[in-house]
Image: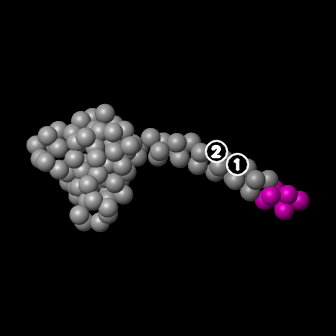
Amino acid sequence: MDYLVFIIVGIVGVVVGMYLARKTSSTVVEQTKPTDERTEKIVALLGENEKITNNDVEKLFGVSDATATRYLDELEKEGVLSQVGEGGRGVYYIVK
């Protein structure tokens, strides 16, 4: 009888965990895209400078390297920026 209780509690725990994971994952995806405000700040920084780097975005928003890369990649896909260079420290972005 005790095993049945443990099995039921385990199943309920898995179902609740899956529900919460789905709910949280959509929020994370929304947070990785730059908001209009952040896009404007990045473009404004480009207006002050000829080019912008991943490091500039990290410092501007206080985000990680990966988040800054996602912001710049998203803006490149939207056609706002153009990447110059293949990869590594030599990469920078300019306004299209």
Visible residue check, residue 38 = no
Q: Mark 1 points at which residue?
A: 15
Visible residue check, residue 25 = yes
- Residue at point 76% right, 53% down? 11
Q: In this view, does 79 lie to the left or right of 16?
A: left
Q: Main secondary structure of the magenta part?
A: helix
Q: Circle 1 sits in a helix, a strand or a loop, which is it?
A: helix
Task: Classify the position of the N terminus by image quarter.
Answer: bottom right
Q: How many labels does the image show?
A: 2
Nearer-the-camera pick, 78 or 56: 78
Q: In this view, does 47 lie to the left or right of 73?
A: left
Vertical position of residue 31 compared to residue 10: above or below: above
x, y percent for residue 15? 70, 48
Q: What residue type is labelled 2?
A: Tyr
Q: State how far apart marks 2 and 1 are (Cα).
A: 6 Å
Task: Classify the position of the C terminus by image quarter.
Answer: top left
Residue 19's label in the rendered image is 2
Nearer-the-camera pick, 94 or 6: 94
Q: Give the range drawn in magenta.
A: 1-7
Dividing the picture into quadrants, the one containing residue 53 is bottom left
